[in-house]
Amino acid sequence: MYFLRPPLTEAAHCYKNKPRAKLSHEAEKTIKKDLSESRESFSAIFVLGQVHLRQSDLKTAKMAEKI
């Protein structure tokens, strides 16, 4: 589900866009690994949700056939 977020205040916008120190190579690798794991787990949850929806659609269709 997608939620709209309120617009950033000027202070938050400045903080979000302020230049940051360059991360070390190890830190970059760790962050990329964490992000890929997050994407994989999100994909798995999404697929499980789709399977659940299909199963409930099949149950609904079978019940409709009985009627």
Image: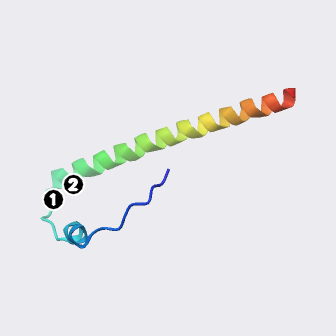
Which numbered disc covers residue 5? Answer: none
Give x and y (percent) for residue 17. 23, 70
Q: Residues within 10 Å of mark 1 (few under 14, many from 20)?
A: few
Position of 65 relative to 8 (above/below): above
- Residue at screen point 39% across, 60% down: 5
Asked if marks 1 and 2 touch (Cβ < 8 Å), the reply is: yes
Q: CA distance from mark 1 to mark 2?
A: 6 Å
Position of 44 with respect to 63 (left or right) is: left
- Residue at screen point 67% across, 33% down: 56
Task: Report the front residue among 65 and 38.
Answer: 65
Give x and y (percent) for residue 23. 15, 59
Q: Earlier in the sequence, mark 1 or mark 2?
A: 1
The residue labelled by disc 2 is 28
Q: Residues within 10 Å of mark 2 (few under 14, many from 20)?
A: few
Give x and y (percent) for residue 11. 20, 70
Which numbered disc covers residue 23? Answer: 1
